[in-house]
Amino acid sequence: MTGRYIPPALRARGGQELDKAQDSEQGSGSTPSGPRGGNSRPLATRSDALPDGDLCSLKEIERHFWPDPGQETSEAKQKTLHDSAATPGELSYVLLFKDANPRWQDDGIIFTKSSLELLPAELADTAKQQGATDGTAAEHRNTGSTSNGSGHMKNGGDEAVGQEHGGVKQDDKLASAPPTQADDSQHLGEGQRQRPVAVFSQLRRSSTDSSRHFNFAGYYRIVHLSFLPPHSAELVRMLEQKWSSKNPRTGQVRQRQRDASAWQESLKMRWAVVKFERDEEAMQSLGPVKVERLEDDDDEGVRGGGEKSGRRMSGRERKGVNELLRELRMG
């Protein structure tokens, strides 16, 4: 039985659609398909296309800054702010967990509630003096004498969980602050230059990839710092926006459900709003951080840092899975 007759015009259209389908399939690595079919724009934080050698794991980062294995702690891996063996008690590096810092990409701003004692107090003092410009001076004065908030040392794990902070009002004030406000913070203590802070950003990878999810984003310095006191109006407004997620394409904002206990726990904390600026001078003089690879690194398991679900796999097991997937794709 012969095939169905197809007019020439339709034949040409069919060939064009076939070519498009083939091109789409070949370019699927840079244009991943959406959850309901079709193509979506590539995520800026996706690292599937990056060589594994360009990435590092939480354990490798911690070992770089704390060479003594006896000083490693499981709690420290879940926090944003970290010191180092070379500069204990001072901010040395920052971990940006995926989906936890939506204002970092555009404004260089993060929110954190753990290890606040690592932040430079002199910058916070300047922010407090200038707090009158946004009506928060009185609250800053009440909390200015302490450099760490209650419960910050044991609550770092929550920062590793994907949190959509949305457009926080206090955050917006920092992002749109007058130039003099940022300049005053930058030029504090002229002659004693602020130590550059290494920033590592967690990227999106498939669940079968290795534990290496972080890349070196660069050296930064703090240009503005302020604190949100517990139970303050500013903190309430921040939390109202914090648990909202915004669709980057449509701009639609969705509110995530949080129970009363989660609200109370967050309201008890003292939060910091930190604005960073890329330190180009440090980038030129120091160059990228060279994190040494650990072949026995198997502490993060199949889903990377901060997530406890999933069976943990050794480095050999992960390597075998990746090789198998490559063979399947090639076949």
Image (spheres, grey):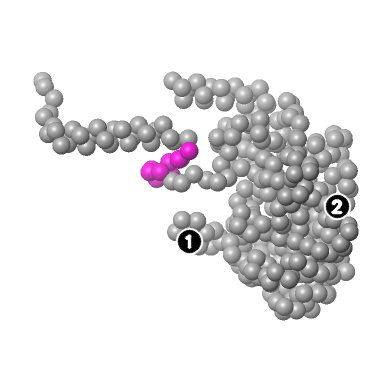
| Residue 209 is a magenta residue | no
In the rendered view of the protein, which quadrant contains the C terminus? top left
**Of helix, strand and loop, which mostly describes the magenta segment?**
loop
Residue at 72% across / 63% down in the picture?
A: 273
**Mark 1 crowd level (few <14, some 14–19, many ≥20, 10 Å Cα):** few
Q: Could you tell which of marks 2 and 1 lies nearer the N-terminus?
A: 2
Residue at 81% across / 58% down in the picture?
A: 119
Seen in the picture, residue 39 relative to 267 is either above or below; the reply is above
Left or right: where 41 falls relative to 64: left
Left or right: where 34 falls relative to 298: left
Residue located beneath label 1 in the image: 251
Q: Foreground: 7 or 247?
A: 7
**Mark 2 crowd level (few <14, some 14–19, many ≥20, 10 Å Cα):** some
Indicate the secondary structure of the residue bearing disc 1: loop
Q: CA distance from mark 2 to mark 1?
A: 38 Å
In the rendered view of the protein, which quadrant contains the N terminus? top left
Q: Foreground: 30 or 309?
A: 30
Q: Position of residue 264 (x, y in %)?
A: 69, 65
Q: In which image quadrant can residue 66 be found?
A: top right
Seen in the picture, residue 236 relative to 84 is either above or below; the reply is below
Can I make out residue 52 in this image?
A: yes
Q: Amino acid at mark 2?
A: Glu
Q: Amino acid at mark 1?
A: Gly
Residue located beneath label 2 in the image: 90
Seen in the picture, residue 324 relative to 53 is either above or below; the reply is above
Which region is colored magenta? 30-39
Left or right: where 280 falls relative to 18: right
Residue at 68% across / 45% down in the picture?
A: 217
Q: Foreground: 316 or 200?
A: 200
Q: Position of residue 130 (x, y in %)?
A: 77, 74
